[in-house]
Amino acid sequence: QVQLQESGPGLVKPSQTLSLTCTVSGGSISSGSYYWSWIRQPAGKGLEWIGRFYTSGGTNYSPSLKSRVTISVDTSKNQFSLNLTSVTAADTAVYYCARMIAARSDYFDSWGQGTLVTVSS
Amino acid sequence: QSVLTQPPSVSGAPGQRVTISCTGSSSNIGAGYDVHWYQQVPGTAPKLLIYDNNNRPSGVPDRFSGSKSGTSASLAITGLQAEDEADYYCQSFDSSLSTWVFGGGTKLTVL
C-alpha cells in the first residue's frame, strides 16, 4: 500500500519561496500508471488543486498559480517537490501531496497526512 | 466561491439516511466528467469515498453510494453512524478552467 509523507518548513516569510517535498513509499513514483499531485487547504476552507507531474516528464499546473509554481521529481529518492514563489499570507494552508489515478476525471486515491505552512514575517 | 456547489451543512440522526448534493455546470459535470467524493475527518487528510460517480474503493462500507445526473451529483449515506461525522467534498474536472475542481465541502453532523 502506497504511503506519502510531506516535509518542509512550517514557516515562510512573505515574498520568499515555499518548498515542500513528498516522499513516496510502498510503490515506485516512476510507475506509468499514476500522476503525482499537490493540493492545499486553507484553514476552515475547501481544497484547491495546485499541480501535478507524470512520469513521461510532463507537468500540469492550476492556471491561477501557474506563474508561481514548479513541481519537480527525484526518482532516485522516490520523491517529488513543490516550489511556490513570491508567497503571501493567502498561501498559508495545509499542503497535501496525493497520488492521482488516470480516469475520465482523474481522482486522488492516496493522500499524505498534510503539512501546515504559515506565511508570516 | 467554488465551481462545484455543495450545501454547507447537513444533519441526521443515527440510523437515518442523508444526501449531499454537488451542483456543477456544462463545463464540468454536465460535460460528462465523472464525480468523486472524499471524506475528511477534522484534522486529518481527505479519504477517497466514491470514485467515478458510484464506485466504492475497497474498505468503504456499502452505506455510502453516489449518483450523477445532468449537471449534478449526489452522495447518499444510509444507516448514519456517529463515525460518519465529517466534512465531505465532491471533485471533478472543469474544461473551461482546465483544472481539477472541488466543491466547497459539506459538514455532516450526526445528531
Image (cartoon, coloured by chain):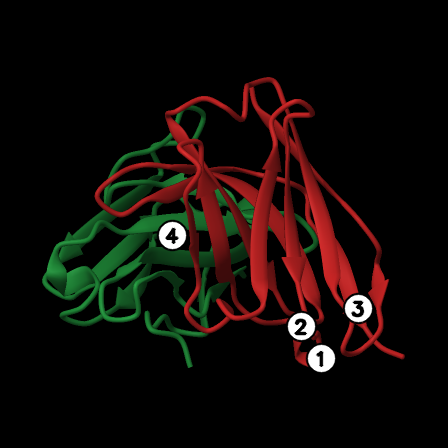
Q: Which residue was labeled with disc 1?
A: A88
Whether residue A52 sits left or right of residue B86 in the image: it is: left
Local crowd size for mark 4, using a 10 Å CA cut-off: few (<14), some (14–19), many (≥20): few
SS class, disc 4:
loop
Q: Which residue is mark 3?
A: A118
Q: In which chain is the residue bearing label 3?
A: A
Q: Which mark is residue A91?
A: 2
Report which residue position mark 4 lands on.
B16
Instruction: Write down the colour of chain A.
Output: red
Q: Which chain is green?
A: B
Which label sits in the foreground, 1 or 3? 1
How far separated are the C-alphas under marks 3 and 2? 8 Å
Task: Identify which amino acid the numbered label 2 is placed on.
Answer: Asp
Measured from the top left, where is residue A55 in percent x and y? Answer: 44, 31
State the CA–CA distance, disc 3 to disc 4. Answer: 40 Å
Report if the CB atoms under discs 1 and 4 are less than 8 Å apart.
no
Check the image and name the residue furthest to the right. A121
Residue at image location 69% in from the left, 25% down from the top: A77
Which chain letter goes with mark 1? Answer: A
Q: Are marks 2 and 1 in contact (CB under 8 Å)?
A: yes
Single out the mark in the foreground, 1 or 4: 1
Residue B72 in the image, given as x and y percentages of width and height:
19, 64
